[in-house]
Amino acid sequence: MPKGFRFNLQPELDRRTRVERDRQIALAAIERDRLVLEERLRAAQRDIGLAKHEVRSRLVGGGVNVPELRMQAAASLHQVGLAQRLAIELAGVYARIEQARAALLKASSDRKGVELIREKRFEEWRQEHLRRENAQLEEVASQQYFRAARDRGAQMGERP
């Protein structure tokens, strides 16, 4: 913005900009939580797949060790429970993401509203500034014209 223009709502615009930035940071933190949970869920699903494969290979291999099979099944069930808890937690994170996005959208909209006011007031200020400049230029031009006319008249012997 040029020198001379002063926007009286600048503190409010600054506050709204900070709120928007805070909302962006909050959304980023939730997104980071989502990524961590998704990776943990993928790892749990891989472990479940490996456990199932291990059980199948032991059943096909011939001699079945029942206590070992029970331990393997219990570990597999534990992984399934973990995966279910992670999926529920992830659903909650998705809900928080939607809320954070809505809050960010509102903050952005609030900031843009004040920015539109600033742009409108700047344009009004600029138009007024140009009008004053033009009036000053016209005044200077008029004065120069009258001086030149007076000087021409004085050169011709006329009295002012």
Image (tube, rainbow, N blue to C red):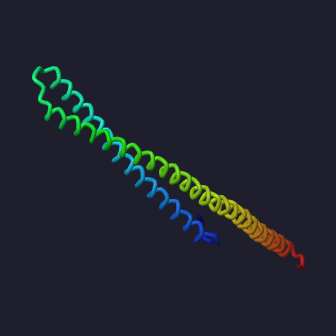
Position of 64 compared to 133: left or right? left
Q: Considering only vertical position in the picture, is 128 above or below 81?
A: below
The picture quadrant where one finds residue 126 is bottom right
Give residue 153's position: percent from left, percent from top: 86, 73
State left or right for residue 31 relative to residue 49: right
Q: Nearer the viewer, residue 101 or 74?
A: 74
Position of the N terminus, as image quadrant, is bottom right
Q: Position of residue 142 (x, y in %)?
A: 81, 69
Which residue is more in the foreground, 52 or 62? 62
Q: Position of residue 57 (x, y in %)?
A: 17, 24
Residue placed at 75% from the left, 70% from the top?
A: 136
Q: Would you say 124 lies left or right of 95 here?
A: right
Q: Give the tally of numbered discs.
A: 0
Which residue is drawn at the image coordinates 42% and 53% (left, top)?
Answer: 30
Query: Which residue is at the front of the view, 151 or 22?
Result: 22
- Residue 14's image quarter? bottom right
Extreme residue toward the right, this view: 159
Q: Position of residue 74 (x, y in %)?
A: 23, 39
Quadrant containing the C terminus in the rendered view? bottom right
Instruction: Identify the residue at the far front of this view.
Output: 66
Examine the rendered structure and indicate whether residue 72 appears above or below residue 61. Answer: below
Identify the residue at the far left of this view. Answer: 63
In the image shown, does 99 or 70 lie closer to the viewer? 70
Residue lying at the far bottom of the rendered structure: 159
